[in-house]
Each structure stands twice: as C-alpha cells, then as structure tokens.
Image: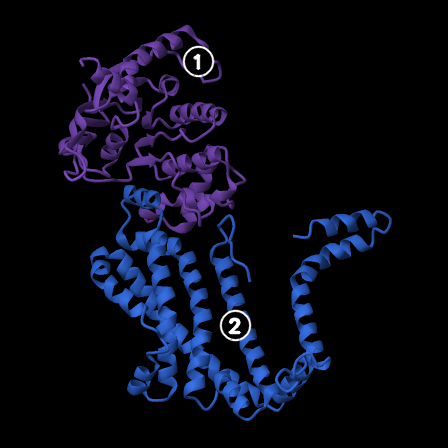
Amino acid sequence: MNTPKLAAQGVTKRFAGNMARNARADFLALDGIDLNVDAGEFLVIVGPSGCGKSTLLDILAGLEAPSAGRVLLDGKPIEGPSLDRAIVFQHYALFPWLTVLENVGFGLVAKRVPRKERLAIAREHLTMVGLEGFEQHYPHELSGGMKQRVAIARSLAHAPDVLLMDEPFAALDAQTRETLQAELLRLWATTGKTIVFITHGIDEAIFLGQRVAVMQARPGRIKALIDVDLDKGDGGEDLRGRPGFAELRHQVWSLLRHEIEEADPRHNLSRQRAPA
Amino acid sequence: MLVGLPRAIAQDDRRSHVFLPIWHFLRPWCENLLAIVLFLLAWELAPRLGVVNRTFLPPFSEIVAYGVEYALAGKLLPHVLASLGRAAGGFALGILTGVPLGILLAWYRPLERYLNPLLQLLRQTNPVSLFPVFILFFGIGYLTKVAIIYWVVVWPILLNTMSGVKYADPALIKYARSLRLGTKTLFWRIIVPSALPSIVTGMRLAATYSFLMLVVSEMVGASDGLGYLIVNAQYLMSIDLLYVGVIILALLGIAANYALVRLERRLTRWKVDVGATA
C-alpha cells in the first residue's frame, strides 16, 4: 500500500475548560481521529455544527497543535503550517487594500517570487477561475461568489499539494453555491489536487466528495466513511436527480439525524425529563 | 437634502434645456456655499445697519480689505510662518513618537498592560495646566510651544494607532499564519495597511488639537505668530487685525484638514465608503 498524501493518526484535541464558568473542566473536541487521504482524492468531512470539524481542519493545516496524535504529509509529521497545504476560508479572508490580482499573487510573497512573476502567475490562475478582466478590481467591488473564486485562485497560485477548504460555500446563495461546486469539481479534475472539504451540507458532501467522512459531536469522532460510487462525469448533467444520489443522501442523513437531535437542546431537555 | 427644489426646477426646465446641465453643475456648489454666504452677508450688514457696534465687529469687507493690505505690506507672512513652524513641529513629533509607540504597545500586549494605566493618567492631565511646567523646563521659546502642542497631538495619534493595529482582521492574520509569513512580512504587509486608516483619523483629530494649543501657547508667551497677533491686536484695539488673525487661523485649519482628508482618501481608495468629509 502506498503512503497516503495526508494522514491523521489518533488526533485528539482537548480544550481546557473554564473552571470559574462551568463545572466541566475539559472539553474533548476531537477524540482519536484516524483519517487517510490519498493523493488526488476529494474527501469531504460532513458533520453538525460544533462537532470539531473546523478544529480538525486547523490541525491538518498546522495552525493548531493536537493534544495527542499526529498529522503526516507524505508520511512525514508536519511542523506547523506550510505552503504545501493551502486553506480556503468561509469568509474569503481577502485583503481589502489589494487588487484582485495582488490578492491572488499574495501567497507567492511567502515564496519570495519577484513581483512581476507573481502577477503573471496570478493572472494565469485568475483566468482558471473565470475572472479575467477583474484584475484591477478591489474585493469590495465583487460579489460573494466572485470573492470565493478569487480566494480559490489565490490558494492554487502558490502550487500547494493539498487544498483544505473550510465550509467555503456556506455564505453563498444556493445558485452561486451550485455553480461553484461544479467549478470546483472541474478545477479538481484539471489540477489533480488533493482536497479536504468541510461542510455541514449533506447534498454538497455527496456532490463533491469521492469519500464522505461523517463526523459526530461531543466528542468529535469519525462515525462512518462512505464511498460515493457515482460517475460524476463532467458535472454537466443533473447529478442530484439520480437515484444513487438520493440513496447516499438518505444514508448520510440517517447517520447525522441522531447527531442533529443530540445537538438540539430541546431533545436534550426532553430526554433529561423522561426519567422523572 | 433639497428634494423639492430640483424636482420643481426639472419640471420648469422641460422647455429650456440649456439651464438644466448648468444647474446640475452648480447645484452642489450652491448647496455648500449657501449658508456661508448668508452668514457673511449678515456679518457685512449687521454693523452697517447698526445692529451691532461697528467698533467691535467691523463689516466683513473692511476686514478683508485690511487683511489684504496688511498681507501685501509683508507683515502677515512672518506670523503665519512662525505659527506653522510651531504647529508642524509638535505635529511631526507627535507622529514620529505616537505611531511607533502605538504599534509597539498594540504588538506587545504585556507592555500595554503595564503602561496603559500611566498613559491614561497622563492623557487626562489638562494640557493648559501643564503650560507653566513646560515653561519651567524649556523657558519661553520654540521648545515650550512645540512641547505643549505635542502633548495634545500625541494622544489621538497613539490611541488610534493602537486600535488600528489591535483590530486588524483576525481572518487575515490566520491566513498569513497559514502561509508561514515571517513577522516582518506580516507586519509590513498586513498590520500596517490594516492600521493606516485609523492612524490617519488620529492625525486629523491631532491637527485640530494642534491649532487649538498653538493659539493658547502663543497668547501666553510669544512675540510673533497668529495667537500673538490676535492678543496684541486686542491690546492695541486694532479690531480689524484681530479678525484677520481669526480668519487666517480658520483658513489654515480648513487647509490642514483638507490635506489630511485627501491623504485619507488616497490611503483608503480600497474602501467602500471613505466616510470622511471636508
């Protein structure tokens, strides 16, 4: 078996609780996560809010250190963040004072690429996401969907091996989201990047992922890994309308239903009352 | 906003299409200048009609005429230059120390924790009450005036720099960390541009305060400058000259603010709305 591109081994994250405010001393956000992502794979992690999926992504990125366990990239333990893993944020995190072109080229600053070359590479990647002609615009002049395109182009520009995407389409309207999902699949197919994508949307998870990791909350664990055996083709046809899609959707939904009920305070209340 | 007027005019002008574009061009100017023109007209007429004593408030046109004459005689410029030199000195010193100190305090939080109480205490110390102290140390000279101006100028610059650095978008800093940017790059490419608008706002406040303290300092101990000119004109009952000094100070204040607003616009071209008006 060849080594996975990115691997989490027993990743655990414990946040020290505030003793003054609540009785619980510690909060176990992630409990022994094992996850292998192969090179060129598109893995989606789906879970209810508060299940620790964003924390997991931060740990994979190297922005946070796990309390226990480790993260391997190409079989080697990671040491903090690095340009070989690019993050795409939900709220874009574009620099408002830089033009679109300068934003896309920003990651290359860290690589010490000269400015002229930087802008040339940026222009190329801007074309890839269909934003040629917007080079000199400022982020505030763009729509949410266009901003996220810029952010995706920016993350690809410094040629990372892995894209880590933290609910990147959650703030977009439904139509823009579907367009960007299809485009992301196209970009993934053309660039061959390894993608770890986090979402709370079941449809989005099945539409995008080759594999879907379903997470549970408190403590954050991977509940199931589901293979998505759908021939996605070129993304042109209505994938969501196929019977196979509906079956998978139901499967993930059933796994998550319990989690969502658990996260809903009303259910907790009724359960606590029951014995009395 | 005048909503009714343009509509009425637009209807009137359906027949004469020549007037409309001219009005569109002139309207902002008319709106801006209307209140000022009325004010100056009242100033002109009140003494002439005997509503106020003309000895205390001469008509505006007389003051302008006197001012032009005084300036052409070469007597005005030395005072203006003396005042500007003092204000610029205090202002520059305020920027040169306030901006780096503000960045330092916001960057190293522990430093702020220890220094902040002292800074709050100093900030609340009335600058006019400190004037005798500065005279004790620096005598009645250039340095005292610069010091007193500096004292009022440094606070808005310092505090605005600190808040500008502190409230840099955490998402941008997180992104920078993911790129593994060095501290120096992070500082120059993210912290400084984030803080710039706030720093310029501080500078605008500082400019206003600097003119205030300039006049106070020149009224107490000076032999030139616009503050001296005004007080001296009062002693000599040269009322025209007194008002010339007041008007020149107002014009300098407007010019300084205008320059800073231009600077602010230049530095914050990327913002949706600058929110700053002259």
Report the residue at 27% width, 25% height from top: A39
| Quadrant in which residue A75 is drawn | top left
- In this rendering, would A115 be left or right of A39? right
Residue placed under numbered mark 2 in the picture: B253
Q: Amino acid at mark 1?
A: Arg
| Quadrant in which residue A3 is drawn | top left
The residue tagged with tag 1: helix, strand or loop? helix
Using a 10 Å C-alpha cutoff, classify the residue at mark 2 as few (fewer than 14 neighbours), some (14 to 19) or many (20 or more). some
Chain B takes which shade in the image? Answer: blue
Relative to A43, say whether A93 is above or below. Answer: below
Chain letter of the residue beneath label 1 in the structure image: A
Return the x and y of residue B157 as percentages of the image width and height: 37, 65
Return the x and y of residue B257 as percentages of the image width and height: 51, 67
Chain letter of the residue beneath label 2 in the structure image: B
Most extreme residue toward the front is B51
- In this rendering, would A140 be left or right of A227? right
Using a 10 Å C-alpha cutoff, classify the residue at mark 1 as few (fewer than 14 neighbours), some (14 to 19) or many (20 or more). some
Instruction: Label the purple chain with its letter.
Output: A
User: Mark number for residue A240?
Assistant: 1
